[in-house]
Amino acid sequence: MKKLLVLGVGNILLKDEGIGVHAVRTFWEEKWPDSVDFIDGGTFTQDLFYLFQEYEHIVVLDVVKGGREPGTIYRLAEKDLRDNPEQSLSLHDIDLLDSLKMAEMVGNRPELTVIGIEPHTLDWDLEMTPTLQAAFPGFVQTARKEILGILGH
């Protein structure tokens, strides 16, 4: 079993919605230990739950609608997604929670952390909004810090 899966999710055709995918593509350009895998999960569906069997921990990079200013970065544990009735869950989050439950039913439930960012606009375009372009380095750095912490570096 590997230590960590970093799953970037989102639709790159919808401006800020694709930030998780853009972040994973950034990490692909870097040197990482064999104990971590980076996957472009696209618009993530429950079909990917089988991947969870191979990991102790999963970090998901995605947009999160938490009602704060665009560009706000969030760090959420699974309990934060489940126990916060005011949290606006995207379809990705619901699929993710269901996938964790399915993974548990077949034998392994990894620990989950979501590094999210408040989007500015989810509309048709391949480019992120200037707001999220400016926040992108901080988002990647927050994710990097989380990854390195899990890996014990």
Image (cartoon, rainbow, N blue to C red):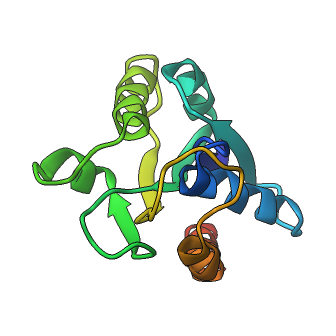
Q: Position of residue 127 (x, y in %)?
A: 70, 59
- In this view, the residue in front, 116 or 67, is 67
Q: Residue at x 32, y 57 (%)?
A: 65
Please give left or right for residue 27 compared with residue 153 in the image.
right
Q: Can residue 152 be seen?
A: no
Q: Position of residue 119 (x, y in %)?
A: 44, 62
How many marks can you see? 0
Residue drawn at x 56%, y 67% is 150
Residue 128 as seen in the image, left or right of residue 76: right
Q: Is residue 67 above or below residue 54?
A: below
List the single residue furthest toward the left: 85
Q: Give how far across and how far down residue 89 sits, in percent.
A: 28, 44
Q: Quadrant of the C terminus?
A: bottom right
Rendering quarter of residue 145: bottom right
Which is more toward the observer, 39 or 107?
A: 39
Name above or below for residue 138 compared with residue 64. below
Q: Residue at x 46, y 42 (%)?
A: 110
Judge whether residue 66 can be spotted in this image.
Answer: yes
The residue closer to the viewer here, 125 or 28, is 125
Q: Quadrant of the N terminus?
A: top right
Please determine whether, in this image, residue 42 is positioned above or below residue 69: above
Residue positioned 39% across, 68% down in the render: 75
Residue 94 on image: x %, y % = 34, 33
Residue that protrudes farthest toward the front in the picture:
124
Question: Which residue is at the front of the view, 50 or 115?
Answer: 115
